[in-house]
Amino acid sequence: MEFRSCSGVKYWFDNSTGMFFPLDPILEEIINPTTFGQTATLNDFEDIDRLYYSKLAKKLKSLQQLSLAEKHPKNRPDEVRKQLMRNGLLQMTLCVTENCNLSCNYCAYSKYYEYSRRPSPRNMDFKVAKNALDYYCTLIEEGKRYNPYRKPAIGFYGGEPLLQFELIKKCISYLEDSYSSYEFLYSITTNGTLLDDEKIDFLVKHNFSIAISLDGPQCEHDRNRVYKTGNGTFNDVMKNVKKFMDIGYERCHLITVFDYKSNLFNLQEFFNNKTMPRISIVTMPTRFEGCTYYTQFSDEDYVNFKEQVETAFTWYLDHVDMQHTFGSFFDHLFGFSASKFLSSIPMFIDRRASLIPYTGACIPGRKIYVDINGLFHICEKICPNFPIGDISTGLNFDKITELIERYQNSLDLCPDCNIEKLCVECYCAFATDEHFTKASQVCNKHANITRDLNRTFSIAEKSPSLINSLAHDYYSWVSKISATMGD
Amino acid sequence: MYFRLNPECFLVEGDHCGAIYDLIDGHLYALTANESALIKHCESNGGVKENEPFLQELKRLCIGNFFNKPIYIEKIRLGAPIQEYQPSNPPHVAKVFLEINNKCKESCWYCGRNGIHRSLGCIGCNIWNEKGNNLSTERWKQLIDELRDLECQSIYITGGDLTFVWDEVLELIDYAGDSFRKLFVTLNEHNYTDLLTESLGSGVQPIIQVTNHERISKDYFNLFVIDGDKYSDIKGLNVDNVAMDIVSSNFYNLPSNSPLISKKKFAPVNIYRFLHNKKFHPCLGNSLAISWTGEVMPCIMLRSHTLGNIRNKCLYTCFEKKEEEIKRLWTMNLDSIQKCRACEFRYACTDCRALEEKLTGDLYGKKLCNYVPERGVWI
């Protein structure tokens, strides 16, 4: 696939190898980029070009041969189990409640998401949590001979998980008493409104990785993140975030969501501030199958937003250099995003997805999300119609195998796609009530990916070393606060 | 005008000079200090003149090209970098040596029990002045199961004289089946016969240790043991099926063309070796050895660096308990060795930590190299 950077340089992405090549006029004339075959003679060129391009043609051929080496294993329950024992089971996330004290506009459990569950007052029983944790520890123990380096990780999720603080405390007390030889990694995702001193002390004492949702300055945050009364939550969240900053707790980080109404420069100014915790994720409300969140915006909103992004990107590009502090909002929006994009492209070999040759989907069981009833799901993001086991019978490897098969069958475009190695979509993008929508009905990636590549290579041209150091900096930090990468 | 190296060509800087590694052609180009500085400038998208003769020469060699505008070159790699940051990645076990016995009736002067220094003794046979009992065949079989679950790629079965336990060797090979990419078995010029090697089956590669170059077999891989002090180039040696094990009592009188200290140290450049050597020690990386008594070690020759004993425990317990130590040994790339860190050839070089430790008393020491990276000269 061809694309250009902002400076007008043309590049070629070769999907068979996962490599990028600058596409100069001579190369374009003499090489068929799909087959890497030589399409014209070099007789009319100067000696130096003739030498270079004839050798390059041979090199490109040998590169393509290099990419043919990997064999993909068969999708069978025993293979799925083996791969999960080795590379999966990275985290068990307990949905301790479906209840929430907020009513955020873009919530993934709101009316805008057709296939997701809705908020409810239901909570997880300790018995369910205990059975889930026992099963996870059994898997970890069994999996040691496949992966002795895996550290068991437990996440608490909701709703708002701190509404069930007593249950969280009980779970941790149980794990510490029953599995004292393990060093658990704990994490929680919270809206930040309920973090009183007792809860903060407890979370800090147990070295929790704490993800707090904060969408920017008050005018931005309170537009979407509101109590059920409609009142904004900014002041309460900021008061609590400050407590972590005051004690210098480094495992507290921020998840920031923006949409078409956001003022990106306000967000940049707000987060580019050393008194704030570091941002871990910047994202727009998810666009899973069945999402209608974006229908509320007018065409004008969209056009204005698009112009704003272009202005912000131009500003970022003008200010890219190695001197700036990592971690600003624009770093996440453009720099990290570009760097992460390049870092996730599997060149020649992709071991992780060997059972799943297309998209960025994991093998279900990489993480285990447990709902309040004790059903296991692929993750917290997917709609609840694709369980992969439960606390009574454990992971169902037959079901996982079948689910992979069904997912693969839905990916009708992928075998012929010339950018499939760049695809990071997963089950969530295709999952509906009971089936996966065909990729041909969902996928419109080409336009977005061309735009992402344009930005990525424009930043990289300005500062070749920055593009690598951004990803290194980000992932080194994330690997210290998180049990899983690339989710 | 701008000049950039191709995606498969890497500049590696030393303290004084630099080198370009072409991972497809397999060439290693030595650069002067000025040439290295110029390429560094180019790789940062610094402007250059198109008539610069050195850059034109690089273009003729298909190492890099001129561009009208600053461009970005995404360098060649294997897989996605994001995978390397995953905190719970399993250990990648590439090769494991199983030393299944410690008996021999020969008395070779270079044998490990004599404390003689060997440059490639790990793939040869040795016996040791150690007390203990052999692991049982059953335990070796369990270990093969454990290695299978760890997705180990290659197994080296070694001893001792393996003909003393030949039935056990065949039983273990049969048990391993086709679970591993490669299976090696060490024999030597005293005990090997065609009948023996044929009994190993087609999936197993014998390594024959010989001291007389006339006994080098064309059919098998040979470990050619040479007295280092008397080393001279041997004409007609096929490097594809012969590795040299240079043996000496002190390595003080090595001739300047010895493969241990001259440019012959360099292994052929390729993508796998280069990317491996950037992260790991060229030999110790992703490698383990299990002694005849069940001691787990980073290498057969590094016997004092024990990582636990698996006689009564599973191998994974060593990874659990010695995670940091195993990672330290495996990732001891040549950037960790003070002298090598200054050298631009460090990702193409071979290195034996066991030998260097014996010669310098320091696991991070370096004696065997005649290159002076601070000046960019061979002495």
Image (spheres, grey):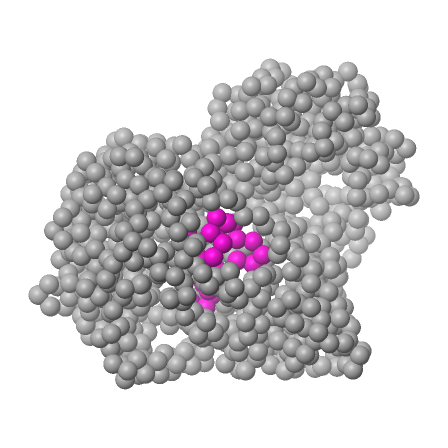
Rendered-image quadrant of the C terminus of chain A: bottom left
Main secondary structure along the magenta-highlighted residues: loop
Q: Quadrant of residue B25?
A: bottom right
Q: Is residue A341 a member of the stretch shown in magenta?
A: yes
Nearer the observer, A155 or B321: A155
Image height check: is A239 above or below B181?
below
Give x and y (percent) for residue A480.
Answer: 39, 51
Q: Is residue A271 left or right of residue B29?
A: left
Determine if residue B366 is in view: yes
Residue at x 71% of width, y 68% of height: A57
Q: Quadrant of the N terminus of chain A?
A: bottom right
Q: Is residue B273 left or right of residue B215?
A: left
Residue A418 at x, y percent in the picture: 53, 66
Above or below: residue A238 compared with residue B313: below
Q: Indicate whether residue A355 is drawn in magenta.
A: yes
Which segment is the magenta one?
A337-362
x 77%, y 15%: residue: B105
What is the quadrant of residue A128 in the picture?
top left
Front position in the image: A367 or A446:
A446
In terms of depth relative to the viewer, which is nearer, A116 or B49?
A: A116
Coordinates of residue A367 in the picture (x, y in percent): 35, 47
Instruction: Indicate whether A151 appears above or below B189.
Output: below
Q: Residue at x 42, y 72 (%)?
A: A448
Observer able to see residue A86: no
Percent across and percent down for residue B354 are 67, 36
